[in-house]
Image (cartoon, helix red, strand yellow):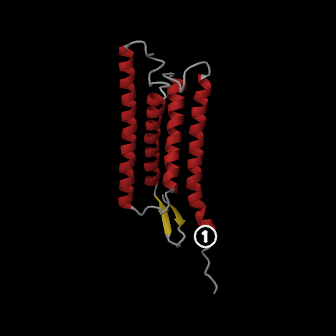
Amino acid sequence: MKATNFSTSGTVQVLPKRLIAAGILLGLGLAGFFDGIVLHQILQWHHLLSNVRPILSLDDVSANTLADGLFHLLAYLFAIAGVITLWQTHQQTEMPKSAQPLLGAILIGAGTFNLSEGLIDHQILGIHHVRSGTHYILWDIGFLVIGALLILIGIGFIQRWRNASQSIDHSPSIE
């Protein structure tokens, strides 16, 4: 099923589901890169296995580095899948003239990453927290809230694009 929308020129634009899928995959990958690069490497707040294997020896550093590398590989695979899906969508159908739906889908993917990683890794498995310490739960909750906000903002972008046709005057002009 495809959503239609009218551009300012009056031509019908189609929102392919594959475009949304591509954006979500890209969002998952980009959020994974952000988490791994900023939180794991730059800020060094945690590693993937911080709570399971605290860094007490060189072997612990090696195990955490390997786990972080596998995490980055997964993010990379999501990003590659997103690019391939975006390319295939571009080849098979006309894309919307606006980047708004793709950006919305990317935000939904990034928010989905935060919610999934935050619930599974931080809460259910407890393999690490956003930032360890006495107030770790506040950091974890903040991570989840950011994820939910990203999803809501992404949905808003897509809805705004879909509703744009209502603001365009399609009646014949009287001159």
Task: Say what secondary structure mark 1 lies in.
Answer: loop
Residue 96 picture location, percent across and down: 47, 62
- The percent coordinates of residue 25 (x first, y second) are 43, 44
Instruction: Please determine whether, in this image, residue 24 is positioned above or below residue 16.
Output: above
Percent coordinates x, y for residue 81 in the rendering: 37, 45
* Kind of residue sitting beneath label 1: Ile
Q: Residue at x 61, y 36 (%)?
A: 145
Q: Nearer the viewer, residue 40 or 129?
A: 40
Q: Nearer the viewer, residue 155 or 99?
A: 99
- Quadrant for the C terminus in the image: bottom right
Bin the neighbour count of mark 1 within 10 Å (Cα to Cα): few under 14, some 14-19, many 20 and up: few
Task: Name the residue located 49 percent from the left edge and 47 percent from the top edge.
Answer: 106
Residue at 35% across / 60% down in the picture? 91
Q: Against 129, is 1 above or below?
A: below
Relative height, residue 140 to residue 155 (above, below): above
Indicate the position of residue 159 as horizontal and vertical percent values.
Answer: 58, 55
Q: Which residue is mark 1?
A: 168
Q: Which residue is at the front of the view, 147 or 62?
A: 62
Q: Is residue 76 left or right of residue 152?
A: left
Q: Residue furthest front?
A: 42
